[in-house]
Image: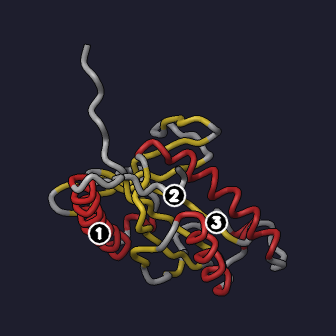
Amino acid sequence: MSRPPTTADALLVVAVFTRHADLLSLTRRHLEGRFGPIGLGADPYPFHHTRYYERTMGSGLVKQLLAFRHLVPLDSLAAQKTLAIELERQIQGEFSGGEPRAVNIDPGLLNLGKFMLATTKDQAHRLYLGQGIFAEVTLRFADGQWEPWPWTYADYREPFVRDFLKQCRDYYKERLREQAARSQLGENGSENPLE
């Protein structure tokens, strides 16, 4: 009987969006408290790609992508999304902006071949992970770049977003090399702050 191969840990990439600039920095601090230090951060960009969130979050949304230094297990995406939902509720309780949802936190996992996002909404191309969470492969890495699928969200199709995620992939390769070097020295290779 064959055994499944061991999978490498993944890079946690979190998208944060809000219409309140001060909430971006507050959310960053909360995320660092939960997930550890940020390794890479993209510049915030106007999130005008859909009006879906305007009813609960207002207009003029700004989005920022953050990649975390600590690698996480590939099977932790549902747990990351559950933590993100809890953190949204906590931040909402601290903020008195008036709208029903002040901030949206969307975690994803990046490895060498794919970038996956978690969601609470089912669709034909999504797999159920448990705990009310689904996963989708949002981008695939091919021919030296991140490529979208027909279902990829509009902002993840943007060249500047895919360029940032390419930087994240390079950063991830560095982190894997560091992890392998520590493992060879006999140190604990796991950096998961959830353990």
Q: Residue at x 43, y 78 (%)?
A: 41
Name the colour scheme. Answer: secondary structure
Residue positioned most to the left: 143
Say whether marks 2 and 1 touch (CB < 8 Å): no
> Badge 1 is on which residue?
171
Mark 3 vs 2, N-terminal side: 3
> Position of 38 compared to 22: left or right?
left
CA gap between label 2 and label 1 equals: 19 Å
> Position of 82 compared to 69: left or right?
right
Q: Residue at x 29, y 58 (%)?
A: 179
Q: Report whether residue 139 is seen.
A: no
Residue neighbourhood size for the residue with mark 3, other residues' Cα within 10 Å, grouped as few (<14), some (14–19), many (≥20): some
The numbered mark at residue 193 is 2
Q: Position of residue 189 (x, y in %)?
A: 34, 53
Disc 3 is placed on an element classified as strand
> What type is the residue that disc 2 sits on?
Pro
> Position of 169 compared to 105: left or right?
left
> Badge 3 is on which residue?
104
> What type is the residue that disc 1 sits on?
Tyr
Residue positioned most to the front: 186
Q: Residue at x 48, y 36 (%)?
A: 127
Q: Position of residue 10 (x, y in %)?
A: 37, 53
